[in-house]
Image (cartoon, grey):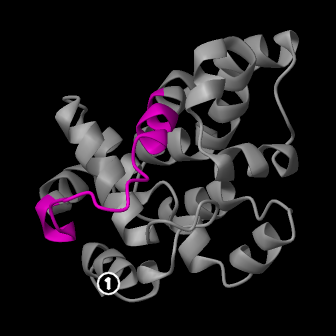
Amino acid sequence: MDPIEKLGEIYATTGHEIFEGDRTVSQTSHALQTAMVAEAAGASAPMITAALLHDIGRIVNPKDREITDRGGDAKHEIVAQKFLETWFGSDVTMPIYWHVAAKRYLMATDPAYQKKVSGGSHRSLKGQGGVFTEAEAEEFLAQPFAKEGVELRRWDDLAKLPDAVTPDFDHFIPHLRASLTK
């Protein structure tokens, strides 16, 4: 099966589970909202693709919901990176990989950010390792694609609106196709 068709099928079926954390939007709605925000920001095709697919690790891992409901961390960013690297390069997979660490970074370095983060994101923070120390924040930001992970994180946080009107998955296919490496 074509990878774009496979991804579309995942979001059309399994993606309709309610988003972990605040339980206000589905995984599909959250993905479409995040990609819409990235597109409106003038992001590149790989970053729009990363925005669309950043939480796919929650969908393709059948144990994710159980682990996160218990306060654990199912490492959805790593699951997503591994799942997607078959088709996409580092410009897509690494911002996805870093978007959880980016929350820890922003919580440590941006006092205004702490007030904007959803309750679900605050709850999951502990299981994800908590707020970075100053040294951890510096080390994180020095990693390749960490800045893109921070940008993705900010879009992620804007994309949890229950009544958002978004384009459908097919709208983003040109960005997905432009980002394919294999």
Residue 12 in sight here: yes
Q: Is residue 110 visible?
A: no
Quarter where residue 107 is shown: top right
- Image: 165 above or below 127: below
Q: Secondary structure at mark 1?
A: helix
Position in image of residue 72 (x %, y %):
86, 62
Q: Is residue 152 magenta?
A: yes
Res. 25 image quadrant: bottom left
Q: Residue at x 66, y 48 (%)?
A: 119
Instruction: Compare residues 48 and 154 and report the one nearer the observer.
Output: 154
The amino acid at mark 1 is Ala
Q: Which residues are magenta?
A: 151-171
In this image, 28 relative to 115: left or right?
left
- Tell whether position 132 is magenta: no
In-front residue for pair 44/162: 162
Quadrant where the N terminus sits is bottom left
Q: Is residue 158 left or right of residue 169?
A: right
State whether residue 122 is above or below residue 19. above
Q: How many marks?
A: 1
In this view, 39 is above or below 123 = above
Q: Is residue 88 above or below residue 114?
A: below
At 29% from the left edge and 77% from the top edge, which residue is drawn? 8
Residue highlighted by disc 1: 12
Q: Position of residue 143 (x, y in %)?
A: 65, 22
Q: Find residue 71 and report its horizontal and vertical position in percent.
A: 86, 62
Apparent side of residue 65 relative to residue 69 in the rendered image (left or right): left
